[in-house]
Amino acid sequence: MINSLLLPELRDLLAEGDRDELAEVLTELHPASIAEFSEGLESKEIWELLDCAPVDRQAEIFGFYSPHRQDELVDGIGRQRMGHLLEAMPHDERVDLLKRLDDKIVESLLPLVANADRQDIRKLLTYPEGSAGSVMTTDYASLPADISVSEAIAQLRQQAPATETIYYVYVLDDQRHLLGFVSLSDLIVAKSSALVRDVMQQQVISVDVQEDQEEVARKLAKYDFLAIPVVDEQHRLVGIVTHDDVADVLQAEATEDFQLGSAIAPLAKGYYHSGVWTLYQRRVGWLLVLVLVNLVSSGVIAAYEETLQAMIALAFFLPLLIDSGGNAGSQIATLIVRALATKEVTLRHWYRIVGKELLVGASLGLTMAAASFLLGVFRGGIEVGLIVGISMICIIVFTNLFGALLPFALTRLKFDPAVASSPLITTVADAAGLLLYFAIATRVIATLGAI
Amino acid sequence: MINSLLLPELRDLLAEGDRDELAEVLTELHPASIAEFSEGLESKEIWELLDCAPVDRQAEIFGFYSPHRQDELVDGIGRQRMGHLLEAMPHDERVDLLKRLDDKIVESLLPLVANADRQDIRKLLTYPEGSAGSVMTTDYASLPADISVSEAIAQLRQQAPATETIYYVYVLDDQRHLLGFVSLSDLIVAKSSALVRDVMQQQVISVDVQEDQEEVARKLAKYDFLAIPVVDEQHRLVGIVTHDDVADVLQAEATEDFQLGSAIAPLAKGYYHSGVWTLYQRRVGWLLVLVLVNLVSSGVIAAYEETLQAMIALAFFLPLLIDSGGNAGSQIATLIVRALATKEVTLRHWYRIVGKELLVGASLGLTMAAASFLLGVFRGGIEVGLIVGISMICIIVFTNLFGALLPFALTRLKFDPAVASSPLITTVADAAGLLLYFAIATRVIATLGAI
């Protein structure tokens, strides 16, 4: 986000070279605010600005620039400055940055970083995208089990500047196996002569390094944790995922579901930074499927050409019937997809949903049938009204049930239920709706004709 | 969420009356896990179970039951047990519970609660739904400015059991004005003889008690805070909003946007606990609007009845053209609505979006036009192909631009842009699409007829 409130002042101070005043600004404001206020500067100016703060502070501020801006800052004069900054950055943030950059740039940056950090980076880069390992940080606080609480607090004072949080502390043995967990709050309240082993909790909720990041975020949120430990298959601590990643992960997953739900292939960079060609590619697929599906729906109409020719008023209600089916279906699909995503509903609830949605579908169908009967009579007489009304209730009941069950079926088949999108339902609603409509029309015409 | 893994064991222990074993389970597992494992028990059994733990632990566990279950637990034998539990519950959670209950139940519960807690509850109940005041808690840690760091830590040890967090501490004067902020981490690292005044940060980012909860959650997430202070108009501290509320608020807001986006009036209780009648009411509105709008679209088709009669093949492509318009429009509307919600795009970006979406729309339109030209030729000959192809590009470009701009217009007019939903766009795409289609058909027929 760009906020230009302080931009002129920052530019003036930079032009005057008033490093003292700039250093004060950089110390007093929150790093996120500094990033926000200076996002509008040129990359060169941002480096001049950052230069007025110690490297730890620079690293903090750097992490709050938008991903797009961070990438720009690494370019040009940024390259040689990034060495020390990478050492000072939180371990998860710097890996996120390096993952976005070209391999060539990464290879030119890594030699500038101290050996220990370089190894840490290479390790974190190996975890697959979307896993706990890919979002965790390795700068956690840890303690041995057999020291006293006062010694523990003294050790934490040492660790504090280098760790992301000292509020949650993990108790490890020599091989880094996770023995227990103690919060700083517990330590403060405990007797200073007690042993860490005796005040720690032994039942520790942890996640596997391969676990899906969305699951990790939900677990963190569920237990109200500040951080959750990440362990490897030998139950050795390899990192922690902290609370500030929860909002980001859940937001990103919701955005992806929104996009899938409108039949858009997920955009890696977000809408604003995606170019025309990317947007085109991500959207054109499903639209073309519509054309293919229309081979069926235009075929249905063509098959009933004579009926339509004989009663042209039937064409007036084509938009109404297919839109109603599509909308009723996507309403319920959205409700179910979201309920599955937030774990409000699980797979085994499907049969209860069927019962409920038969009732909801019938009620909606009846209401809609009444309204469209009136519209049909108004536009084409009683016969048309009957045809439209009867078709409407059949279409709504069918598409509503289809929209309710599709997300379950997709989940069962290991697809993301979020693709149970409006367009997918639209196409099914089209074909089924047209078939129902013309079948009912033919029947009603024959019956009324025979009277 | 119900997890029946331990359910039989819990039932056995309850039947045997093995209170020691139950007490151990209640101490060793995380409160969230206990709630999860016991959610499947009867309310009476849950109270028996909780009875084996001290009241503070009971309050912790109680907070992790689903809202629906909490409401049930208050009923029946729960009523007289709730007094002490309410005193021990986090102040924000107990208010959330009371807000969901009937006023009569609340009035019968309040006399059971100690006077100070009762006043706190009544105060918190007055804040409007969705405001910072309605999600904040009043059990925060605070310190005066003129004590030493070691005295501060001693005071925090006293406050720890009664506060939601001691990691963030607010420094107040006698009238509770917010003077500054200090983290427990800062206190641990500081010299023990230093004054709180000298180690605290004076620039404190706070929110107003009336501020929208979504804004508060985004601010917490943006600055990676554990908690954010809530102040009244005199800048006096009235509460804090903690990190564990961020995920809940953002999830709830995303769910609301999903529902609005499918033209469903937001469901207060979630899908699973909403009855058939509620679901019917929340969905029927927009579906009926579709019928009304069809007064226009059926009118358009009726107006061109002769054209249609003369070239019945035009009816084959009605579903394709209106669906394509609707889907292209709702794709882009979803992208923009989400980008606005996550602040990736702001109102003043609208003109850039117009430029970009003219290009994307034209590219999508051309591709779709080519595909539907072929389909048109296949079903009805070259003339129909031309009509369908030309109509397609016009419809896609128009609905794409409309879908891109609608969220901005809605935001500008102070509506929630999330209502720029598929159904709203569908209806516009219908009417506009039909008008374009028949206008183009008439023109092409006239032109080709004249050759």
Image (cartoon, coloured by chain):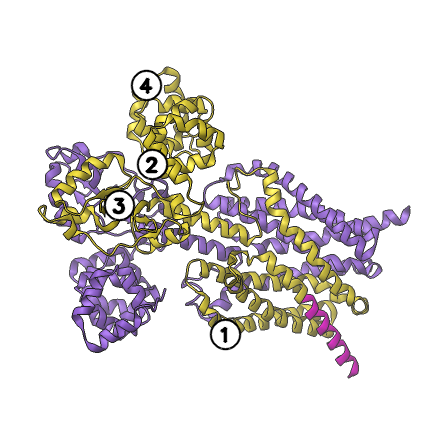
Chain colours: A purple, B yellow
Q: Earlier in the sequence, mark 3 or mark 2?
A: 2
Q: Is residue B442 visible?
A: yes
**Place of residue B242 in the rendered image (x, y in percent of width and height, measured from the top left):** 32, 45
Residue flagged by tag 1: what amino acid is it? Gly
Chain of the residue displaying label 2: B
Q: CA distance from mark 1 to mark 4?
A: 70 Å
Which mark is on residue B19? 4
- Camera-side residue: A75 or B434? B434
Q: Which residues are magenta?
A: B433-451
Locate residue B36 relative to residue A282 in the image: left or right. Answer: left
Locate residue A262 relative to residue A391 in the image: left or right. Answer: left
Q: Are marks 1 and 4 on the same chain?
A: yes
* Element under disc 4: helix
Which mark is on residue A144? none
Residue flagged by tag 2: what amino acid is it? Pro
Q: Looking at the image, which residue sits at the far bottom?
A: B451
Residue highlighted by disc 2: B90
Residue highlighted by disc 1: B355
Residue flagged by tag 3: what amino acid is it? Arg
* Element under disc 2: loop
Q: Is residue A79 visible?
A: no
How would you classify the magenta stretch by its main secondary structure?
A: helix
* Element under disc 1: helix
Assess whether mark 4 and mark 2 are in contact (beta carbons under 8 angstroms). no
